[in-house]
Amino acid sequence: MGDSSKTANKKGDKEPSNGEKLSVKPIKLKIAGETREFDIDKPKLPQWIDDYALESGGYPYSSRMKKGEYEETLERLQIELVKLQHWLQDTGGRIISVFEGRDAAGKGGTIFTIRQFMNPRTARNVALPAPTETERGQWYFQRYAQHFPTSGEFVTFDRSWYNRAGVERVMEFCTQQQVEIFLTETPDFERMIITEGIHLFKFWLDIGQEMQLKRFHERRHSPLKSWKFSPMDVAGISRWDDYSAALHAMLERTDMPYASWTIVRSNDKRRARLAAIRHILLSLPYSGRDLEAIGPEDESIIGRGAAFLASNMDKSSASGT
């Protein structure tokens, strides 16, 4: 599920051509009970966004993790990931790790960090484009299942079959009947994955609304990141509440004991990356696992499903952000 997926566009939703700047009008938003106007084309980020971005959505930290601490911790965890990959190859184990979340929550960066020092021959990332005409006529899960891991593989999905529960639902790229079929079938589909012996992780990377606006603004004005900013992002900015409702419905119907959702509060990308990696490492009994090197989970930013997400919203309401 994504709130402005680049992979679920209708035929008519064209990206701007090379060198052509996407036209965006100022957008009125209601945030924390106040009506704000956000003009993403203005080079200066509004102060009301900059002041509250990091702690938006009830995020528990008021400053980012220091770079030195992050890099030192990350190196220890990446060494453990290499051990994990050797264990998969020795035992024939298989892993699927699905990354979903609010747009600009840092899914791609988290996946890159996980795979950075793993052998790419057996650690693959799947980021599918819009479905072809043939794929649109297939069973919905079919085009995803063909990318599932074989013996010894670690496969990450940068967005997944959960597109139907999010962007397709909110942007009306599918019917309500198709959404209902998806929500009904997904627990059985994922039960088959688990029964087959595949380790399945489902991560939802969550960010506050002001942080999302800040990251969109950065993309809009960065020559290196402007390609990430699409018409779907523009459409999604004003549909925050619609995506929130879709998220809650998704969690209610697809968060199962055998295929649970792990929520990662991701306003600080550094902490979020470490949290996701730790969760994977602590969940698997691979050879040579060093629990001291991995460290404990930061339970203030990572937890299970709807209950953890609700606690985040409660903190947001209490702080007024």
Image: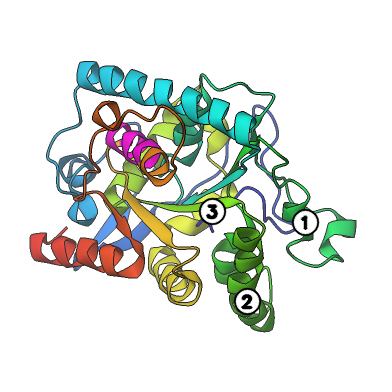
For residue 82, above or below residue 3: above
The quadrant in which residue 293 appears is top left
Q: What stretch is highlighted in magenta?
A: 269-278
Name the mark nearer the viewer: 2 or 1: 2
- Which structural element holds mark 2? helix
- Where in the figure is residue 88, as x and y percent of width and height? 59, 34
**Left or right of 285, for residue 208:** left
SS majority, magenta = helix
| Residue type indicated by callout 1 | Lys
The quadrant in which residue 138 appears is bottom right
Instruction: Indicate yes or no whether the magenta region holds residue 150.
Output: no
Residue 179's mark?
A: 2
Instruction: Indicate yes or no whether the magenta region holds residue 270.
Output: yes
Q: Residue at x 75, y 66 (%)?
A: 140
For residue 155, above or below residue 224: below
Farthest right residue? 134
Residue of label 1: 11
Q: Distance between the residues labelled 2 and 1?
A: 20 Å
Figure quadrant of the C terminus? bottom left
